[in-house]
Image: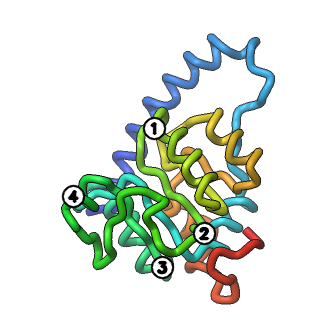
Amino acid sequence: AHDLILLLYLNSIRMRWRIATTAFATMSSSSSSVPPFRNSDDTLRRILTKSKTIALVGASKKPDRPSNYVMKFLLDHGYQVFPVNPAMAKNGDSLHGQRVYGSLKDIPSQPIDMVDIFRNSEAAGEIVDEAIAVGAKSVWLQVGVVNEEAAQRALAAGLDVAMNACPKQEIPRLGISGPDPDAGSSSSNL
């Protein structure tokens, strides 16, 4: 049931995103000197195999939310996931047996290999900046989360970037079973 919900959710987001990006591209194609960000399978594979610690920003305790079941999927595939949600952290909540943190800087296991962002496109910029500040190795902006400027800042800071994609879809598509057991946590190889 979660896969069907995810598929419907992802399709609705992609349709809205296509309409918005088509309008945006028409308005800004002549003024932009930076080509739009494109994911590469090599980068996605590197992030997903070299990352062991993942901060999931925008975690939700609602089981029908993509952040909830994507977190469970990542845990089931051997990743250490730190859910981030200020309201849940304030209440002392846990999610899938993991303590919830209020922000990236509150997570004791630093640096973080990957920051998985389940927030809107505008809010993603601030989270990317926080990821850079705490020394994260990569940022992953979920399906429907597109922030070209934030992606460029992350790349300029040396982070790997995935945008408008979901690890729950990419892990099986790329034939990945989880993190590489030989990859050290917070590996500098990322």
- Type of amino acid under label 4: Lys
Which residue reaches farthest right? 33
Query: Residue type at mark 2?
Result: Pro
Structural crowding at the residue carrying mark 3, measured as other residues with C-alpha within 10 Å and reported as few (<14), some (14–19) or many (≥20) = some
Residue at 57% over, 47% down: 128
Q: Position of residue 171 (x, y in %)?
A: 56, 68
Of the numbered discs 1 and 2, the one sitting upstream in the chain is 2
Give the structural element (helix, strand or loop) at label 3: loop
The residue lying furthest to the bottom in this view is 182
Q: Nearer the viewer, mark 4 or mark 1?
A: 1
Q: Which mark lies nearer to you, 4 or 2?
A: 2
Which residue is labeled 1 in the image? 123
x 73%, y 53%: residue: 40
Left or right placement of residue 76 versus residue 128 in this view: left
Q: Answer with the quarter of the image where residue 106 lies.
A: bottom left
First in sequence, mark 4 or 2: give its number.
4
- Measured in 3D between alpha carbons, the distance from the residue under mark 4 to the one under mark 2, in whole angstroms, is 28 Å
Quarter of image, res 81: bottom left
**Local crowd at mark 2 within 10 Å, few (<14), some, or many (≥20)?**
some
Q: Position of residue 190 (x, y in %)?
A: 73, 68
Name the front one of labels 3 and 4: 4
Q: Is residue 82 above or below residue 23?
A: below
Q: Amino acid at mark 3?
A: His
Looking at the image, residue 177 sits to the left or right of residue 104; the answer is right
Tell me the element at label 4.
loop
Q: Report the residue marked by disc 2.
A: 111
**Mark 3, residue position:** 77
Alpha-carbon distance for marks 3 and 4?
A: 21 Å
Q: CA distance from mark 1 to mark 3?
A: 28 Å
Distance of label 2 from label 3 (alpha carbons): 21 Å
As helix, strand or loop, the secondary structure at mark 1 comes to helix
